[in-house]
Image (spheres, rainbow, N blue to C red):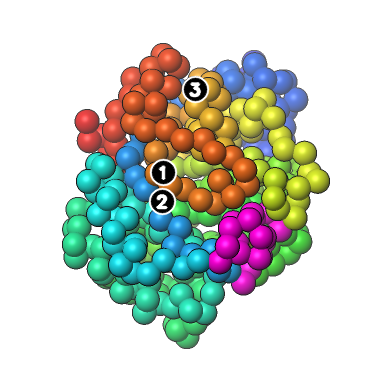
């Protein structure tokens, strides 16, 4: 197949060529994804990170239609962790070997830039080697707007307080979808502004994609094209992570959840399309380890983090859990070689 050869040689494919591969079916997608892995020289090593997600609050004024986590969705009572509670969880996580802490909450004026800097300082001064991969672009914009400073200034203060990198939390970067499902989250152009600002400060991020909210394949490709263009502009992404929406307990509960085949096909399509992002995660948190294992032969080269105590996906009724041994077994069963990595996708063992 001509497109297979093009990808194998490191060539870029257009959206219409991606569509052509999609129409070729599961096997064509798998072949093209593996060709991209080969052209990037990734080999058989598959990384994972020991980390913890601290969801510090579910009080959020955004009330996105696809979210079961915010308090008004009625699944989890409203809560906000105190700084002492957060620090205690960090301490426990470090004693369990965590090298990365993620902090994610909601959008609320009470969570201001001063608080965000203060909690980062408290954690980073106690654990200077710990990576703090924290706050979404929407949270950063909320901090910046609340403080009346430009996004780049908010990021500079967060960086000076200990922020290492930012999760991409992109959902779908398609303006019509955002207006309909998450109008109070950041717009596509402000998401890009956060990424360009991060890059100019020498910081890193990831690009994500949540799909299966009734969008068309063309809209998924629009998202991927936008991510690829931002990466061309500033090279800020270390990884791409895609997962299907878990509609249970959300306002989109009538949309049927996508099956494993569509997840794997979308993952493979993303890998073939994103020629400028080195790492693609396998999405075990929503799909489980068996599907993650298959994903490692459909373009993924990383299984992400063990994510102790993640709450956002659990609120949608999905309760997948694992530890280091589960991760390593999943990787070995896929015929790959596991290694632990750090926040920047570098091998640490
Ligand atoms: S997805 Fe994030 S911003 Fe949207 S309602 Fe849920 S917690 Fe709030």
* Mark 2 touches mark 1? (CB < 8 Å): yes
The magenta stretch spans residue 73: yes
Q: Would you name the residue on which mark 1 appears?
A: 307
Image coordinates of residue 79 in percent, x first then y, are 50, 66
Image coordinates of residue 297 in percent, x first then y, are 51, 20
Residue lying at 19% horizontally and 65% vertically, measured from the top left = 125
Which of marks 1 and 2 precedes in the sequence?
2
Tell me the quarter of the picture where residue 19 sits: top right
| Rendered position, 91 above or below 21 | below
Disc 1 crowd rating (10 Å Cα; few below 14, some 14-19, many 20+) is: many
The magenta stretch spans residue 18: no
**For the residues carrying marks 1 and 3, which lies nearer the camera in this image?**
1
Magenta segment's dominant SS is loop
- SS at mark 1 in the image: loop
| Rendered position, 72 above or below 264 | below
The answer for how far apart the CA atoms under marks 1 and 3 are is 17 Å
Magenta stretch? 61-78
Residue lying at 71% horizontally and 35% vertically, measured from the top left = 258
Residue lying at 50% horizontally and 27% vertically, measured from the top left = 289
> Horizontal placement of 190 versus 309: left or right?
right
Q: Would you name the residue on which mark 3 appears?
A: 293
Which of marks 3 and 1 precedes in the sequence?
3
- Can residue 181 be seen from the camera position used here? yes
The front one of 320 and 21 is: 320
Which of marks 2 and 3 precedes in the sequence?
2
The answer for how far apart the CA atoms under marks 3 and 2 are is 22 Å
Q: Would you name the residue on which mark 2 appears?
A: 53
């Amino acid at each position: 197949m001509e497109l297979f050869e093009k990808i194998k040689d490191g060539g870029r494919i257009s959206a219409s060529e991606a569509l052509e591969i999609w129409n070729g079916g599961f096997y064509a997608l798998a072949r093209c994804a593996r060709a991209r892995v080969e052209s990037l020289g990734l080999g058989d090593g598959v990384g994972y990170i020991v980390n913890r997600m601290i969801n510090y609050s579910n009080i959020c004024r955004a009330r996105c239609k696809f979210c079961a986590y915010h308090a008004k969705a009625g699944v989890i009572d409203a809560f906000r962790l105190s700084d002492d509670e957060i620090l205690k969880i960090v301490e426990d996580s470090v004693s369990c070997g965590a090298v990365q802490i993620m902090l994610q909450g909601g959008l609320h004026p009470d969570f201001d830039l001063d608080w965000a800097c203060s909690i980062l300082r408290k954690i980073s001064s106690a654990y200077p080697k710990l990576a703090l991969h924290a706050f979404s672009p929407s949270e950063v914009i909320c901090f910046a707007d609340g403080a009346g400073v430009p996004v780049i200034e908010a990021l500079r203060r967060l960086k000076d307080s200990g922020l290492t990198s930012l999760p991409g939390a992109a959902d779908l970067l398609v303006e019509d979808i955002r207006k309909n499902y998450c109008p109070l989250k950041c717009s596509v152009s402000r998401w890009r502004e956060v990424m360009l600002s991060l890059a100019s400060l020498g910081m890193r991020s990831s690009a994500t994609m949540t799909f299966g909210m009734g969008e068309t394949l063309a809209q998924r490709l629009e998202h991927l094209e936008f991510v690829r263009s931002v990466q061309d502009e500033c090279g800020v992404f270390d990884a791409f992570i895609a997962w299907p929406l878990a509609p249970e307990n959300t306002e989109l509960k009538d949309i049927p959840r996508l099956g494993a085949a569509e997840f794997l096909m979308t993952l493979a399509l993303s890998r073939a399309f994103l020629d400028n992002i080195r790492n693609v995660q396998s999405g075990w948190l929503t799909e489980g380890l068996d599907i993650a294992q298959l994903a490692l032969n459909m373009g993924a080269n990383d299984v992400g983090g063990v994510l102790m105590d993640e709450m956002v996906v659990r609120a949608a009724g999905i309760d997948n859990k694992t530890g280091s041994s589960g991760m390593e077994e999943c990787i070995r069963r896929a015929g790959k070689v596991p290694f632990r990595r750090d926040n920047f996708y570098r091998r640490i063992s």
